[in-house]
Image (cartoon, rainbow, N blue to C red):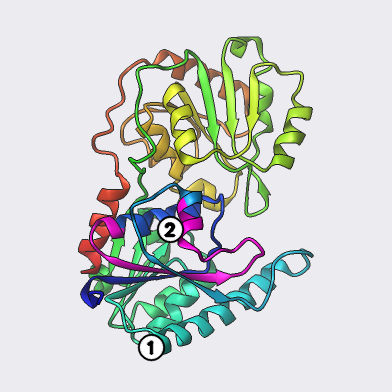
Amino acid sequence: MKNKSKSIYYLTYQDFPANTANSQQTVATCKYFVRNKFDVKLIFPLRSQFSDANLNSLKKKYEFTKEDFDVVGIIHKTKFEGTNKFKKIRYLYSHILWAHHSVRKIIKEYENPLIFYTRSDWVFFFLSRKNKPVVLECHKITKIRKKLIKYSIRKKCSKIIFLNKALNDLVNLKTKYVDKVLVQPAGYDEDFFYTSDNKVSKQVVYSGSLSRLGLNRDLDFIFNSFDDERLSDFNLKVYGGTENQISLLKNKYSHISNITFNIHLSKKNLGKELSKSEIGILASSNDNYSKYFTDPLKFYEYCASGLEIIATDFPAHKNLNKIKNITFFTHKNSESFINAVLNANKNKDVNEIKFLETYDSRIKNVIKFIS
């Protein structure tokens, strides 16, 4: 019989398995909860034709073997495939319906856990209304989410984890709730990312999706910069994107010989590639979330791999520069980007990462907070 005092239900409106950073973060959270002797149940909607609530499928996709937890898929009556018409409204409506239905179902059919864990503001809201112990891990703020948080945090058993101080400041909860709030940044998974002495000289890497929520990440000026003779002896390796996206990029930039485009790699293979590289690129679109509130997973992966980092000079990126290994460039400015690459190449200092958050240290902080 499982120990209720060590049980966590991770109830979330995400799809699995997937290539997204948020799905990787959720599975890593479950994995490290298990390593810290918790009984975990991951519960999510079967919302696409690729949804798979089979633990072995998740183990294969996310490359773990020893950690076992329960996986529960709950029916999702609306689909996101097909037309983009009214997609945001349909998403919101579907999210609310699924969260309401799932909270009622889980409470009715399962014993109460020590705590519910979620990244869904609506799951957080419905569980809070029922006075269930729940913690929301908040990675982004919307107007609706801000209202839901301010209502839900008033409940006795509700807590929230903000990914960074900027998100915490934006919500601006009353000081009486200070003990119910944790600011906890992301971290890297030591199973996959490590430093190496076998660096390939002047190898630059971009790792991550080529779009976020359907928006272009404004990477064209970066790719075009490698056609400049000052970067002719640097090689850029891009890891991310679908087969169709990569095919289009290969055709578009076939005239630039020092760029290679690759589809998403497994974490183990990505770790090997990052460990051999010298410089990593942090870049994104010029939206408010990217500028002020992001805490990108690849920052931690780059640092753990011993990379110098070049990043757009957004406030969110500047808040990451704790180990002084970031050179900044101006968004969509090729000249600024080229100079950042050249300056980063001159920095041969060994990067100190012992104070960098790992996923294990991150989850240990979370456990102290929820216990």
Residue 42 colored in magenta in the image: yes
Q: Nearer the viewer, residue 311 or 313?
A: 311
Q: Amino acid at mark 2?
A: Thr
Task: Report the disc number at residue 130.
Answer: 1
Which residue is labeled 2 in the image? Answer: 26
Q: Can residue 183 be seen by looking at this rendering?
A: no
Left or right placement of residue 72 versus residue 187 in this view: right
Q: Quadrant of residue 154?
A: bottom left
Range drawn in magenta? 33-59
Q: Can residue 195 be seen by looking at this rendering?
A: yes
* Quadrant in the picture for the C terminus: bottom left
> Residue at the location (45% across, 53% down)?
59
Q: Quadrant of residue 349?
A: top left
Q: First in sequence, mark 2 or 1: give its number.
A: 2
Task: Report the disc number at residue 82.
Answer: none
Q: Is residue 370 above or below residue 311?
A: below
Measured from the top left, where is residue 114 in percent x and y? Answer: 27, 76
Q: Is residue 74 above or below residue 324?
A: below
Q: Callout 1 environment at 10 Å: few (<14), some (14 to 19), or many (20+)?
A: few
